[in-house]
Image (tube, rainbow, N blue to C red):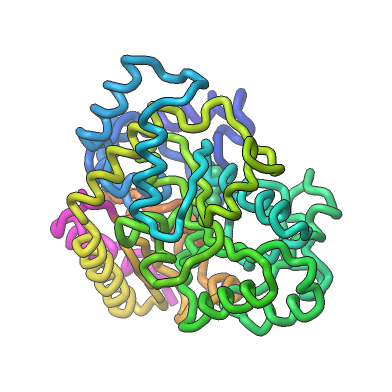
Amino acid sequence: MKSKKLFERAKKVIPGGVNSPVRAFNSVGGTPVYIVSGSGPRIKTAEGTELVDYCGSWGPLILGHARKEVVEAIQETASKGTSFGINTPREVEMAELLCDLVPGLDMIRLVNSGTEAVMTALRIARGFTNRRKIIKFEGCYHGHTDSMLVSAGSGLLTGGISSSAGVSKETAAETFVVPYNDLNAVLEVFKRHGNDIAAVIIEPVAGNMGLVQTVPGFLQGLRDITARNKSLLIFDEVITGFRLAPTTYGRVIGITPDLTCLGKIIGGGMPIGAIGGKADIMRILAPLGSVYQAGTLSGNPVAVAAGLATLKLLKKEKPYPTIAQHGKKLAEGITQAARKAGIKMFCPCIGGMFTPFFCDGPVTSLADAKKADTKTYAAFFHGMLDNGIYLPPSQFEVGFISATHTDSDIIDFIEKAGSVLIEIKPKK
Ligand SMILES: Cc1ncc(COP(=O)(O)O)c(C=O)c1O
């Protein structure tokens, strides 16, 4: 009831009642929940109901909610001042730590969100190459900067069309949108427009059409094509950075992009983003170079303190094998439960990220992902919610397992999923 009332009040003063569209539950229906607190893997709603959280603030909370050391770092820093707009020692420590943890990143600039990181990376790419066009992949989300709110146009070579009102035709046309995992499509665009492609940007593991991984050789293919054509390769690691190891996914697979965008985990739940890359490219940023970028709150001491505490804990505790093991167990368990219930499911999982796609696999592109039965996902989401488990409120997002989910949380998830799947199975 409280959530319902809060949502009614919110709708009067906030467009759609939410500060980010997916929170409105439009994809799954029903009333959005309101959260008052979190601890470890659990969150508490305004009604006082405890839920096991598999959304984790969309990725940042790899250490779970309100991890003691992170909260203490925030409190201690905030008590000494929340913002100065002047340099602080911890910014230097943060940049050094990131460059140390991600060989290949020579320099880092901190910003306030993943969107801002991507926006800056694209401007750097255009400034550095003196070219205009960008290639992105269908189903990848890179924040809400204009040139990324674009869908495929009528043909591969014609440039994109805007996917949001307010993005001009001209801006959209400068982004080519090609299918994920389709190297031939990328080659085709390069063949025709190679001299004008500033950058190729990709989520090296896609987390915004549900979880979709690249096929062997695809990312290396992108590295080769971009290098050959003197375009920049940008890995958007806003989700994947520090998710699979205490470094980037690029580093894990041994591919060094020219620029890397970071966010989420590196802020430990506080607003942050970062762009990093090779020194010769990063030196183009003001005040050294000709590409302008700035921010009143960039390198904010409280966000940096939370991020530093998180990164240090990840480096020390290395929770990754356990998270991966839990992810594998959950994905296998839920797939088996779906088979038992006679429901089609393909559930990929990597680094504690997972998506139960309600369709047959494999899912290697947005076209594949769209085959999923979103009605069944919505029913599953609500069935799990009624059983005290919070999943992302959309089929086309990823669930996140944190270091605080225990073996018994995972077993409980699988058991509950088993009953929910039987309950929601369409009756013949
Ligand atoms: C891969 C990726 N890039 C960029 C962004 C944008 O980050 P933010 O929401 O912090 O602006 C997101 C957000 O989910 C993302 O998943």
Q: Magenta stretch? A: 402-428
Residue 326 lies, in percent from the top left, at 22, 64
Along the viewing direction, whichever of 148 and 246 lies nearer the viewer:
246
Vertical comparison of 80 with 356: above or below: above
The residue lying at 32 percent from left, 75 percent from top is 335
**Left or right placement of residue 372 versus residue 158 in this view:** left
User: Percent from the top left, x then y, of residue 404?
Assistant: 20, 49
Residue drawn at x 55%, y 34% as measured from the top left: 19
Q: For this rendering, which residue is in front, 382 or 76? A: 76
* Left or right placement of residue 60 versus residue 199 in this view: left
Give the number of marks: 0
**Which residue is rendered at x = 22% and y = 69% of the image?**
329
Which secondary structure is most common in the magenta stretch? helix
Determine if the magenta segment contains residue 14.
no
Q: Quadrant of the C terminus?
A: bottom left
Location of residue 384 in the rendering, given as x and y in whole percent from the top left corner: 33, 55
